[in-house]
Image (spheres, grey):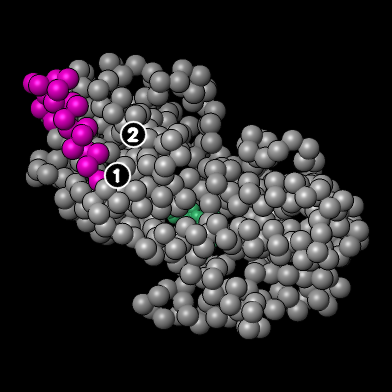
Amino acid sequence: MNITMIGTGYVGLVTGTCFAEFGHHVTCVDKIEEKIKKLDSGQIPIYEPGLKRLVAKNVDEDRLRFTTDLAAAVPGADAVFIAVGTPASRRGDGYADLTYIYEAAGELAPYLDGYTVIVDKSTVPVGTARQVKRIIREKNPEADFDVASNPEFLREGAAINDFMRPDRVVIGVESKRAEKVLRDIYKPLYLIETPIVCTTIETAELTKYAANAFLAIKISFINEIANVCEAVGADVTALAKAVGMDGRIGPKFLHPGPGYGGSCFPKDTLALMRIVQEYGENVRLVEAAVEVNAAQKARMVKKIRDMLGGSEAGKTISFLGLTFKPETDDMRESPSISIIPALMEKGAKIRAHDPKGMEEAKKYLPDGITYASNAYDACTGAHAVVLMTEWNQYRALDLEKIKNLLKEPIFIDLRNVYDPQTMKELGFKYAGVGRK
Ligand code: UDX
């Protein structure tokens, strides 16, 4: 089939490339000429494991191409996916900014040629697809098209696997014709018996928010329970294991930490709160999850301060990991963005290392941080080390070496990677999250 993907950001690029890998012919369009030039020369603007190889393979096999020319990319497409950004609105009120979506709809409309399904891939508030339909109809009254919603559930760092082996595919449509086009696009997944949930457009749009909000609630729940564990002297790791063994709860997303970050949970929880307000409804659990997440980040600052004897002034703190999760260079809403400046304001000096995120980190963190070449370099001469992001590189550190490099053997493990008893035996003053 012929697919046009508008937007070569994280979602558009991964989705377009994976559709090409399915065997479809995909044209990825972006307005930013520089980006298209880079992609044409084999450079990938983001770090996502496996993506570079998959792009190269599909370009070589003539199923994937990049262009800035919408007029050439839209005619003849069976489906045009809109995967442009929906950042939080600049007004700071939590609403998603839909300018780019509506712009894309208006710009593609004149080039529609033959029956085409216009699919919202970006995470958008309920009602957006109907607006897209209205805009296209206005610009091109003769066009033969349907709109649809097909939310993505990709995790950064695991996006290709998530795309190739999804738990489910959700398609929101209002005609059998559009349903058939989308089912045909996802046909390669029938082999692995991926369930396809076919529903209304509004349901599909809301499903994405509900899924992300539930996961955010699950993380905030375990973070609160971790704090209770610290108070009563219990161990959250064993607790989460036991709780997660209940098939109704499940073991995933029960890892306590410094709070969730990334491009989705913080933005989508706020957007959902705003959407429901407009309908006079409430999502109190979601509001609580957002509050708990902010409090968790602040609690980590206090934890580090307490471990340093009550003040970070004049102390050097080593940070291992800066990104919001491993296997990505994405710094958006990373807990490190609030934790590190809070410590610096009170006079702490920071030495930091991240395997992939240091260039991005420089855009988000204050000046004055020393960026280290590896974990050991980051620990050299520091009064404490904070394991911030659970990259594999930090899971089997030479702990004796770390202890010798540190001025004081203080290890604050915000991801519970290491065993408290072992750390104690090695001579560290150790703190995890939710463990004695
Ligand atoms: C998320 C959703 O998982 C995905 O389906 C959606 O399409 C986009 O948003 P992503 O933001 O890439 O994906 O990362 P995810 O793996 O979900 O982690 C989000 C945040 O939660 C990270 O900061 C992570 O460290 C944190 N987290 C996750 C926890 O603190 N504990 C957990 O148990 C799981």
Q: Position of residue 187 (x, y in %)?
A: 24, 48
In this picture, is 252 found above or below 102?
below
Judged left or right of residue 74, residue 239 is: right
Q: Which residue position holds label 1?
A: 125
Res. 349 in view: yes
Q: Which residues are magenta?
A: 126-145
Name the residue located 64 percent from the left edge and 63 percent from the top edge: 299
Q: Is mark 1 within 8 Å of ligand 1?
A: no
The kind of residue on which mark 2 rests is Leu
- For numbered disc 1, what is the local secondary structure? loop
The kind of residue on which mark 1 rests is Pro
**For the residue carrying disc 2, how many other residues have a C-alpha within 10 Å: few (<14), some (14-19), or many (20+)?**
some
- Quadrant position of residue 68: top left
- Quadrant position of residue 174: top left
Nearer the observer, 274 or 262: 274
Name the residue located 91 percent from the left edge and 58 percent from the top edge: 407
Judged left or right of residue 284, residue 298 is: right
Name the residue located 18 percent from the left edge and 37 percent from the top edge: 130
Which residue is the extreme one toward the front? 280
Of the two numbered discs 1 and 2 on the same chain, state the one appearing first in sequence.
2
Nearer the observer, 296 or 323: 296
Circle on res. 98: 2
Judged left or right of residue 304, residue 216 is: left
Q: Position of residue 178 (x, y in %)?
A: 14, 40
Mark 1 → mark 2, Cα distance in angstroms? 9 Å
- For numbered disc 2, what is the local secondary structure? loop
Q: How many marks?
A: 2
Q: Position of residue 203 (x, y in %)?
A: 21, 53
In this picture, is 159 found above or below 36?
below
**Magenta segment includes 128:** yes
Name the residue located 46 percent from the left edge and 77 percent from the top edge: 244
